[in-house]
Amino acid sequence: MPTYRYQCECGVQFEAVVPMKDHQKPKECPSCKASAQRVIPEDVAGVFNQSVTGPIPQNTGLTSFDGHTDRVIGVSAKQGWDEHEKRVRLKKRVLADNPGASPEALSRNPDGSYRLLAPEERGVHDRANAINSLAMKTLRPRRATAPR
């Protein structure tokens, strides 16, 4: 299906993938939810960002979709870091309440809180980690050696 450009009265331009038979029908604006009419671009002008600043495609600035995508990625990254920092704080709190305990002795509960493993749980945990480590070494692709 082709992609068409729409312009809302609120100023937002957006693109939508629409069947050719429906291209004249107004589309809902993603910003204000009003009906937006299809527009035909007269020309394309802009400067592309030629310096790479990360592992994802760079924002060309040519469409509102680029800006929206950048915001979504930014919000997602912030939420991820906030969750990570929350987990680190919870772990540090449990370790502070149990002097001498190591981070390896922590276990995450189903509710997201942390606790120290009991000694018998710790043994099972250590054996499971050893088995997993051996399995990963076995599954890791072997490097080709040069003929001698």
Image (tube, grey):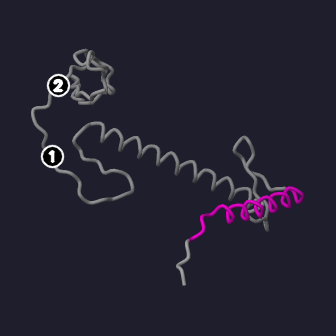
Q: How crowded is mark 2: few (under 14 residues within 10 Å), some or many (20 or more)?
A: some
Q: Residue at x 27, y 16 (%)?
A: 22
Name the residue at the front extreme: 148
The quarter of the rendered structure image containing the N terminus is top left
Q: Which residue is drawn at 69% across and 64% down?
A: 138
Left or right side of 48 for 76: right
Q: Is tag 2's residue or tag 1's residue first in the polypeptide sequence?
A: 2
Percent of width and height locating residue 40? 15, 27
Residue type at numbered disc 2: Val
Q: Which mark is residue 46?
A: 1
The quarter of the rendered structure image containing the C terminus is bottom right
Q: Which mark is residue 39?
A: 2
Q: Residue at x 41, y 45 (%)?
A: 73
Q: Residue at x 9, y 32 (%)?
A: 42
Name the residue nearer the viewer: 50 or 72: 50
Find the magenta span and give its range.
Answer: 118-143
| Residue 70: quarter of image | top left
SS label for mark 1: loop
